[in-house]
Image (cartoon, coloured by chain):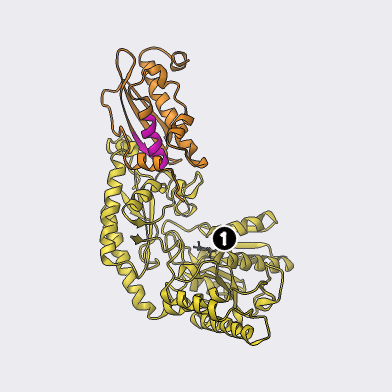
Amino acid sequence: MALYSEKVMEHFRNPRNVGVIEDADGVGEVGNAKCGDIMKMYLKINDDEIIEDVKFETFGCGSAIASSSMATELIKGKPVSEAMKLTNAAVAEALDGLPDYKMHCSVLAEEAIKSALDDYYSKNGESANKSGE
Amino acid sequence: MIYADNAATTAMSEAAIARMTEVMKQTYGNPSSLYSIGQEAKEVLEQARADIASVIGANPGEIIFTSGGSEADNQAITSAARFGLRKGKKHIISSAFEHHAVLHTLNRLKEEGFEITLLDVHEDGLIRPEEVEAAIREDTCLVTIMYANNEIGTIQPIRKIGEICKSKGVTFHTDAVQAMAHIPVNVDEDNIGMLSASAHKFHGPKGVGFLYVRKGVPVYNLIEGGAQERGRRAGTENVAGIAAMAEALKEAVTDISEKMASVAAKRDKLIQGLSEIPHSAINGDASHRLPGNVNFCFEGIEGESLLLLLDDKGIQASSGSACTSGSLDPSHVLLAIGRVHDVAHGSLRLSISEDTSNEDVETIISSVGEVVEYLRSFSPIWRDLMAGKKQFIL
Ligand SMILES: Cc1ncc(COP(=O)(O)O)c(C=O)c1O
């Protein structure tokens, strides 16, 4: 029996969208080193409010890296309004599930994306929650 | 495949497998039965007891067979506590980095009203005998200190602690699960009152171990039932497992000095090689250390992802990160030696054996280096450290 689904292992071994966007329109960092997980997301958003590019950096376990990777895939090329609706359950489901005690990794991925969107909105003078709903 | 997790468990030796199957096939009788095949099983059992006793300098009557290290620890500690209680002694001394088989048993006694002193293990992972001495009180009924730590491999000054306990008249138990068959252990020279050991840590089978109890030290049974083990452990004996344990132990201690030197040389090569990875540090004293144990922290990475990528490269190891323990906190051992959470999450334990080759050592060093570098390449902590936004700890 494997610890993780094949999908998790595949994203862990070949994470998508790894790296940094130097001139990002929104950056979000969540988690802390004490708990053993930190995720940082970088968003490039165009004039039509489409997420043109997204990159991540993660310090954490296999499922944290896989969750970050999957979350970036789910929002890349999507309108900001759609990205605001990303849920941790969607991330976990796209990974064919996570062990119960690893579900917090998908929560962290959702929070990292939202934190980067918050940053984008605050730079553009609007609250993320207002625009998201 | 390079198996470098021998502190978790070991592969059974050919001799132990042969002995086990031989006994299973030929000596299936119940040692308590009076007819011949029962008595043959009894003989196998008593021969194993004598062999084990002779390795550790004990008398056969002082060996109780158990289901492993955890049971032996439970029985030793519970016995000392029960006997202490009868004399109004409710204080126990132990250390902060014992195995959970010891710590959880102590926690239960604490709930029952015992007072537990957990000694500091210092940054080098070594207990100071003078601190043991200072902690002993009139009402101390037990000192229990592990022989060698299972995560960082540090070997405790057992002989001195044993001497102190002997002179103060306090029962001394040691969890020797990691030490047994890897370094010489002698219950007389070390002044040990009770000792726990487990066969699967020295190339024997899982689910079998023993508790040594010095003659005159009171011991209670945990399991009620028949009169096996002279009433100290009920249940039909695991004859084949016990015979295989004795076989594995005899084999392991043959030429033990040569084996220790050869394994320690590989360990030191690993320590040297891994030290070259920037911002890394060995956990625990480098010299008072089990021959096969290497334990490092690497700043800026997390242990579980390190283990998974090493597994992809065919290397099996372990980590004290929270993710590998299934809890939110990293290993209590690393915290006890003063590693902060941030770096304790990035730990790696390699526990090698005589089967580890020099080539394996080279492969491990280069693979760990590659994986650490890769994980750091997209670690936000590492980026902050490199940018000077955070201070390096290691
Ligand atoms: C130091 C120590 N004590 C006790 C145990 C428990 O032994 P067993 O697995 O045989 O119950 C272990 C093994 O995990 C150990 O390393």
Q: In which quarter of the image is residue A78?
A: top left
Q: Estimate the x, y position of residue B141 in percent, counting from the top left.
A: 65, 67
Q: What's the residue at 67%, 76% (across, down)?
A: B228
Position of B47 relative to B231 (above/below): below
Magenta stretch in the rendered image: A57-72
- Say what amino acid the circle numbered 1 marks: Ala
> Mark 1 belongs to which subunit?
B
Instruction: Determine the residue located farthest toward the bottom in the rendered image.
Output: B36
Q: Chain B is drawn in which colour?
A: yellow
Q: In which quarter of the image is the N terminus of chain B?
A: bottom left
Toward the viewer: B84 or B41?
B41
- Residue A69 located within the stretch drawn in magenta: yes
How would you rate the neighbour count of disc 1 (Cα within 10 Å): few for under 14, some for 14-19, many for 20 or more?
A: some
Residue holding disc 1: B101
| B70 sits to left or right of B288 | right
Q: Is the magenta stretch mostly helix, strand or loop?
A: helix
Toward the viewer: B381 or A79?
A79
Toward the viewer: A40 or A99?
A99
Q: Visible in this render: residue A61?
A: no
Q: What's the residue at 34%, 56% (across, down)?
A: B315
Q: What's the residue at 47%, 32% (across, down)?
A: A107
Position of B204 relative to B57 (above/below): above
Q: Chain A is drawn in which colour?
A: orange
Q: Is mark 1 within 8 Å of ligand 1?
A: yes
Toward the viewer: A47 or B291?
A47
Q: Visible in this render: residue A35?
A: yes
Q: Estimate the x, y position of residue A127 in percent, counting from the top left.
A: 43, 15
Q: Estimate the x, y position of residue B324 in percent, counting from the top left.
A: 45, 49
| A77 sits to left or right of B187 | left
- Residue A53 located within the stretch drawn in magenta: no
Q: Estimate the x, y position of residue B81 in percent, counting from the top left.
A: 67, 65
